[in-house]
Amino acid sequence: MSTHALDQFSPAQRRSVKTVLRTPVLLKTEVLGGLVVALALIPEAIAFSIIAGVDPRLGLFASFTMAVSIAFLGGRPAMISAATGAVALVIAPVVKDHGVDYLIATVILAGLIQVSLGLLGIAKLMRFIPRQVMVGFVNALAILIFMSQIPELVGVPWAVYPLAALGLLIIFGLPRITNAVPAPLVAIVVLTLITVFAKITVPTVADKGELPQSLPQFGIPDVPFTMETLSIIFPYALGMAFVGLLESLMTAKLVDDITDTHSNKTRESLGQGAANFITGLFGGMGGCAMIGQTTINVKAAQARSRVSTFLAGVFLLVLVVALGDVVGLIPMAVLVAVMIFVSVATFDWHSIAPATLKAMPKSETTVMLVTVVFTVVTHNLAIGVGAGVLTATVLFANRVAHLVNVHRVVSGDGDEQKAVYTVDGELFFASSNDLYAQFNYVEDPDRVTIDMERSHIWDASSIAALDAITDKYARYGKTVEVIGLNAASQRMQERLGGKLFVVKPHCSWFIARIPKRTASNRRTGQT
């Protein structure tokens, strides 16, 4: 399918299942996308099953049920969900210590937790993830995808290398000639035929593990329904729920950017939970959104609707159950080439361009690098993103903490003399710590006014700082009047003023309680 032929359809038309099913050119794109993704999913699902320490069938069944379920329940069309390495790492200890049945129970509980988190609106927290954390997340996943292919290129027959090179040549070169068929699919077919007819002995999909011979069956895990069981599986289920949702929501945001369309993150959270619940009931190891396969679907295959996601699951089951012998002949070299293409396409090369690095503030680059390093080192998306968000928060707080300015003007003579301080900037826990030291307590006249018209109080730390200031002036026998508070700041001052423990700046070992004041003297500094 040529890109020009697809350009005649709007993003809304390409996302519509009804439009896709009625339009042959769009349906062809979705079918081919689903087929390529299914072929790429098979070795990945088997590999993730090995990481989790379970039979390959659990990973393959999970990929089928996740893909099919999320096609109906998810909030991001064309996104692929299946068994993933991130989830496999979280649940591996359960299998090792307690067995497969406890794993299945963990997956079911994780699904219920994800549904609960979705109902609580966890998707709204995505707005607090900075762009540079998102860039770091994408780059780290690209690196991890590439690193995961290295074992397939070490200690293998020499023929693997020219086959992988040929696969890369086809995948990167064919789109320059035509987009009628996805390049990864062409590479898979061509290299499989070459190895079969030339009788080249190289590692194949069949070498990764035995493919299932039957359909997944409904069942309840054989575990005691007791508090002891819950205490065992709950920590792992909670970790799986958070990691799965985080990776899924960030992948959905990435697809939003690629396709210039919006998705329903709350529905995606609920859909991921429901899909994991269903997967557990059918004996799967659970999963979440997969950025690699999603990239294949939306970038290489140009798919945009739920049809491709649904067909990826259906094709996967058909291929491994009905055509397992044929699929087993696919050389791993070509799938390595496909995943290398995915890593190259996923990486944000613009983010490391010299011109970008030169123009970007150092703090922004630091956030991206921290996210990449922590994700790659730990192989844990949640830790990487958490470290990136924490770094961004600290750097942001440090930057804005110095944006509060205090201007002092002394006017009048004799008894009419007074000092007026104008506070300009946002007051919160970081900036308010510097506020205490910007007043001349000894030399100021007996009357002091603090004008807050150009400021805003955001938290209790700022109220405590104002209390500390008025308290210190009171000890010198001077009165303070705070004026210009906006409505929100005034309400916070009336609710918390004089009721907080204040840690005296520069004397952190001494904690004093500000005497409780009445409403009439709170603003004057009298005790």
Image (cartoon, grey):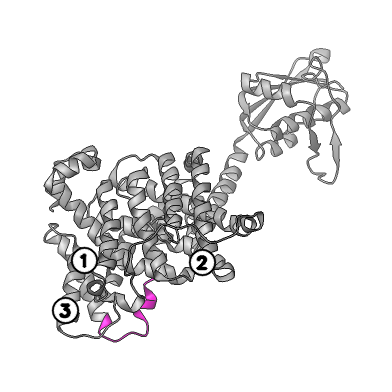
Which is nearer the eye, 344 or 70? 70
From the viewer's perspective, is 97 left or right of 243? right
Q: Secondary structure at mark 1?
A: helix
Give yes or no for residue 157 being in the magenta stretch: yes
From the viewer's perspective, is 490 left or right of 170? right
Q: Residue at x 33, y 45 (%)?
A: 72
Give yes or no for residue 334 being in the magenta stretch: no
Tell me the CA gap for discs 3 and 1: 16 Å
Number of other residues with Cα within 10 Å of mark 2, as a class: few under 14, some 14 to 19, many 20 or more: many
Residue 140: give x, y in percent of width and height: 43, 61
Pointer 1 or 2: first along the chain: 2
Query: Which amino acid does the dot numbered 3 rest on?
Result: Ile
Residue 273: give x, y in percent of width and height: 46, 48
Mark 1 or mark 2, whichever is nearer to me: 2
Mark 3 or mark 1, whichever is nearer to me: 3
Tell me the CA gap for discs 2 and 3: 39 Å
Q: Which residue is mark 2?
A: 100
Examine the image and state in which quarter residue 353 appears: bottom left
Magenta segment boundaries in residue numbering: 146-160
Q: Secondary structure at mark 3?
A: helix
Q: Which residue is mark 1?
A: 171
Q: Which residue is mark 3?
A: 194
Query: Which amino acid does the dot numbered 2 rest on?
Result: Val
| Vertical order, 269 against 316 (above or below) | above
Q: Residue at x 11, y 61 (%)?
A: 177
Tell me the CA gap for discs 1 and 2: 39 Å
Residue 131: give x, y in percent of width and height: 44, 47
In the picture, the disc for residue 66 is none
Asked if residue 370 can be seen in this view, the reply is: no
- Mark 2 and mark 3 residues within 8 Å of each other at the beta carbon: no
Quadrant of image for the C terminus: top right
